[in-house]
Structures are given as C-alpha cells and as structure tokens.
C-alpha cells in the first residue's frame, strides 16, 4: 500500500490550498471491501476530498462525521452485513465490515504534529529500504475499558533494524509493535497485518501496514506513443522518468532505482544497448515495444556479443509488451502496458476476475474480534 507515501507527498500542497479538517484511514476489514487497510482520505474544511476509502459509498457519511469531530479520534464501523439499512432501500456495495479511524487534522491537532516527523522518516527509510512498516493504533483500552486517545493513530514507523516512535507508548506495547514490525519486514512477500493483544492491563488493536515507495517506471523513448504511457502511469501515482536523449545508459541505471522499464525508442541499435544495461538492473519488468521476432533478434545478437543473459533475466523480459486487450491506438497500447506492469509488480497473472476462483483480495490476517467503535449501518450514496 502506498497511500501513506502519496499522502505525505501531497500534504504540503493540500494544507496550503485548503484548511485541513480530518484524515480517514481504513484500519480493519472483514469480508468484502472496496479498499483495504491502509487506504487513506484527506478531508478539507469545505468537504473536499483527496484519496478514497471506498467506492463512494462511505465518503459522504464520513464528511458528515467531520462536522462534530473534536480533537479525539473516532473509530467508525460500517457493517455491510446489517439488514437494517435495507428498510430504506440503501446498502453498501460490498457485503463486509469496514472500520475507519477518523482523526482531526486541525492546525492544533496531534495528527499534524506527527506529520512533520512522518514526512522526514518515511521517505528517508524508503530511500535505503524497499519497504517499511507503519503501525497505526485504532483502539487502546485500559483495564477499565477506557480508551486512551493520545496514542491512537500512526505511532510507529519501522525499517529493518530501526524504528521511530511518534508517540509515548507503554513500554510493553512499543516493544510488541516493534517486534511484530521486524517480523513482517523479515518475511519475504509478507502482507499487512491487523493485530490484537492484551499487554499489562491494556488491550491494543493495531494495523501493521507494509508501506512501499511508489513504483518507479523508466521510459526510454521520445516518440508520440510515450506521452500516453507517461500520463496513465502518472495517474497511477507512479514515479515516471523519461529518458529520451542519448546519454550514458549504464551510468543512469546504476544511479537510479528502476522497478519497471519500457524500451520504445524505435531505434534497433539503441534498444540493444539499453536492453543489455537493463538486464543488469533490478527492474522486475523490462518491456520492449515491437514484435516477438524483433526481441528474439535482440537477444540473439546480445548473446553473440557475449553479453551475460541469465534465464532469470529473460524471465523479466516482456515483448511484445502489454496485456492482450485488442489495443491498437497509442492510448490503448499504453493502457495494456500499464496493466501488465501492475500485474507483474503485484505478482498476479492479469487474467479476467470472472475466471478467478475465490475472493479478489487475499484476506489480511486478523487479530481477534473487532475493536469497539461507533457502529453504523452501511449506507451507499452512489
């Protein structure tokens, strides 16, 4: 999930353009839901929204709750399994339960006070590590059942071997969250986790969210077909780097992180030199525009030039590029390429969901029962 990264990047402009009112974060789900834990939305003082926590079903109700929101956060529980709302002919599009932590983002709120630290810590850690874990407490009760609001929200950011606490937590809870975060980071392919734990008289519910930098796509080319690919990729929130001029490709790849690359210079010799350099990069996706026979010829000539190409490297090569959606126009081809890159980076096959067996999303591990909060019937405003 990269919603936190995108929020941190956009926050200064949002704060300047519109007085901030609140931030809503999906912290827990059960059953079917449109967005997963970690999804965030910023609400402005005039009801403006940046981001989304549902398909549009919950946003209006969340904005309504902002009007009475004080300095303490509120946990909203939307129950799509309830049948009460059917009396009014309204229901949530997904038949699941969604818990949303609503926090004040007013100028004197704790949330804004933590933003400065988050804005420095998260990018710094991601510059040296591929992923970090952000711990968001959405319920912390003492032995009498009283909520401790001062330590709710995102309270800890952890990289491998290091952590930054954003609030003063009970030592046992801080140690537990740090330990769980390190275990997640050490596990290859781990996903975000919702935990519940009783510690020294406290009951804590927290989302341990794996945060990754937005994918970085490098596009080699300067033709008219580059712009649609750049636009759609930017709309996805990806970092897009255009390499159109002739430059030292090896040096560029050595100094730049590259998650995916698309080679579309339409210059055979240049494509060959770029491809040779990309095979030595960490790019998970290497796309080369053109027919299969052209890619086969490129590989054959690189092999004759004694360029080391491993089976693993060839496994990262995608040519022809894009999913098979019948694309012809540049915009359609760009859509097919972006969809294929997304599937590869997410380790999915890219097939039709109607043919998939089981749920769309893999369920997050759950830590016991749901946290107590304001329970609402799910009302769809679409």
Image (cartoon, rainbow, N blue to C red):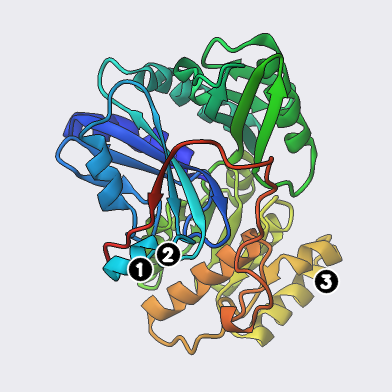
Number of other residues with Cα within 10 Å of mark 1, as a class: few under 14, some 14 to 19, many 20 or more: few
Would residue 167 appear left or right of 303 to someone viewing this image? left
Residue 86 is tagged as: 1
Q: Which residue is mark 3?
A: 304
Whether residue 69 is visible, yes or no, is yes
333 shown above or below 29: below
Number of other residues with Cα within 10 Å of mark 3, as a class: few under 14, some 14 to 19, many 20 or more: few
Q: Position of residue 297 (x, y in %)?
A: 71, 80
| 126 or 153, nearer to the observer | 153
Task: Give the CA distance from mark 1 to mark 2.
Answer: 5 Å
| 348 or 213, nearer to the observer | 348
Would residue 95 appear left or right of 330 to someone viewing this image? right
Does the CB distance between marks 3 and 2 fall below 8 Å?
no
Q: Position of residue 13 (x, y in %)?
A: 26, 34
State the SS at label 2. Answer: loop
Q: Quadrant of residue 12?
A: top left
Would residue 54 appear left or right of 195 to someone viewing this image? left
1 vs 3, front mark: 1
Q: Which residue is mark 2?
A: 83
Which residue does the image show at 67% across and 33% down from the upper left? 196
Q: Quadrant of residue 80?
A: bottom left
Task: Give the CA distance from mark 1 to mark 3.
Answer: 69 Å
Number of other residues with Cα within 10 Å of mark 2, as a class: few under 14, some 14 to 19, many 20 or more: few
State the SS at label 3. Answer: helix
């Amino acid at each position: 999930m990269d919603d936190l990264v995108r929020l941190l990047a956009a926050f200064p402009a949002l704060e300047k353009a519109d007085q901030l009112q609140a931030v809503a974060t999906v912290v827990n789900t059960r059953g079917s839901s449109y967005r997963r834990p970690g999804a965030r939305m910023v609400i402005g003082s005039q009801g403006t929204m940046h981001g989304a926590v549902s398909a549009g079903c919950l946003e209006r109700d969340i904005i309504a709750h902002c009007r009475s929101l004080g300095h303490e956060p509120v946990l909203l529980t939307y129950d799509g399994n309830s049948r009460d709302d059917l009396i009014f002919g309204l229901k949530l599009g997904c038949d699941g339960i969604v818990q949303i932590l609503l926090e004040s983002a007013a100028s004197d709120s704790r949330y804004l006070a933590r933003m400065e630290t988050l804005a420095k810590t998260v990018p710094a850690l991601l510059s040296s590590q591929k992923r970090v874990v952000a711990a968001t407490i959405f319920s912390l009760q003492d032995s009498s059942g009283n909520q401790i609001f001062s330590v709710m929200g995102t309270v800890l950011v952890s990289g491998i071997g290091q952590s930054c606490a954003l609030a003063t937590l009970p030592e046992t809870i801080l140690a537990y969250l740090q330990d769980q975060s390190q275990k997640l980071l050490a596990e290859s392919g781990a996903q975000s986790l919702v935990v519940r734990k009783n510690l020294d008289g406290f009951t804590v519910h927290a989302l341990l969210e794996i945060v990754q930098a937005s994918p970085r796509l490098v596009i080699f080319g300067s033709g008219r077909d580059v712009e649609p690919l750049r636009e759609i990729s930017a709309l996805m929130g990806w970092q897009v780097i255009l390499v159109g001029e002739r430059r030292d490709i090896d040096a560029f790849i050595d100094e730049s992180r590259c998650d995916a690359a698309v080679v579309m210079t339409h210059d055979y010799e240049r494509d060959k030199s770029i491809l040779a350099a990309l095979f030595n990069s960490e790019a998970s996706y290497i796309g080369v525009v053109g027919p299969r026979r052209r890619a086969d010829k490129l590989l054959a000539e690189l092999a004759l030039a004694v360029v080391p190409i491993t089976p693993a490297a060839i496994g990262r090569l995608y040519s022809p590029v894009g999913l098979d959606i019948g694309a012809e126009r540049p915009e359609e081809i760009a859509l097919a390429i972006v969809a294929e890159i997304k599937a590869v980076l997410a380790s999915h096959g890219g097939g039709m969901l109607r043919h998939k067996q089981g749920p769309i999303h893999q369920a997050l591990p759950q830590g016991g029962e749901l946290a107590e909060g304001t329970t609402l019937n799910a009302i769809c405003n679409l």
